[in-house]
Image (spheres, grey):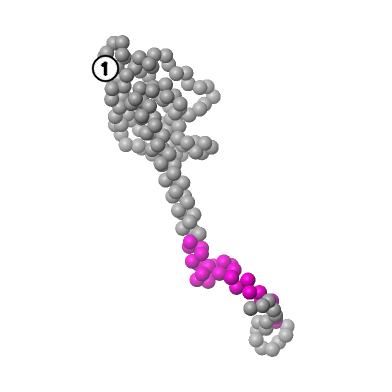
Amino acid sequence: MRAGISNVAGSGDNSQYALFHRDIALYRPLADPWNPGGRLLLAAALLLIAACSSLEHASSSKKLQLQLQSYDHAVRWGDLEEMYAFVKPGDEPLAVPRGLENIRVTDYEPLTTITEEPDKRIRRRVRIEYLHRDRQVVKKLVDDQVWEFDEASKQWFRTNPPPEFR
């Protein structure tokens, strides 16, 4: 169909003319939300928005799981200085205490499931058994961890300091 002038009213009255173009018919469903095609497109757009929001949450959740696995691995295998790399950067960096090389972790067990809080923050409790290599005395501690998602870096950080091994 070529662009042209057509009589809108169809009555022979030459005062009511409209300009039609073949491309306008392609965009009509987008402009009219009551048109079935427009409603379908609107529903598809809403589903896409919901899916993207769900993916963002899933991505954040997956990042949390990976971060916690990395942290747990570092503690279980005795790389205790690495615990401080997971702490959220602040005004003053946390000092890594001396003597961590003398600590050997013998057991690491999560006691509670992850508890979500508002503002993309979670809590969990972990039991750590360890010994001082020079004394060979087994000790236990409970590590109450608080993790928070940082929107700027899109990464989870521990917000409270790692436990002290005494």
Q: Quadrant of the C terminus?
A: top left
Residue nearest the observer in this picture, 119 or 64: 64
* Residue 66 picture quarter: top left
- Can residue 117 be seen at all in this image of the molecule? no
Residue extending farthest to the left is 137
Q: Nearer the viewer, residue 15 or 59?
A: 59
Q: Residue at x 45, y 18 (%)?
A: 96
Q: How many marks?
A: 1
Q: Quadrant of residue 126?
A: top left
Q: Picture coordinates of residue 21 (x, y %)?
A: 66, 74
Residue 37 image position (x, y, % from top left): 51, 69
The relative height of residue 89 versus residue 103 in the rendered view (above or below) is below
Callout 1: SS: strand
The residue at the point 51 percent across, 64 percent down is 41
Percent across and percent down for residue 165 are 35, 18
- Residue numbers of the magenta segment: 16-44
Residue at 31%, 21% (x, y): give it.
105
Residue depicted at x 44% and y 50%: 54
Return the x and y of residue 118 as percentages of the image width and height: 43, 40
Please check the rendered image and state whether residue 61 is part of the magenta-colored stretch, yes or no: no
Quadrant that contains the N terminus: bottom right
Q: Is residue 84 visible?
A: yes
Residues 40 and 69: in front is 69
Q: Is residue 20 magenta?
A: yes
134 over 72 or under it: above or below: above
Q: Horizontally, is 35 left or right of 64 in the view? A: right
Q: Which is nearer the eye, 63 or 47?
A: 63
Residue at image mark 1: 138
Return the residue found at the far right.
15
| Amino acid under disc 1 | Val
Rendered view: 77 above or below 147: above
Count neighbours of disc 1 (C-alpha within 10 A) and say few if under 14, some if 14 to 19, many if 20 or more: few
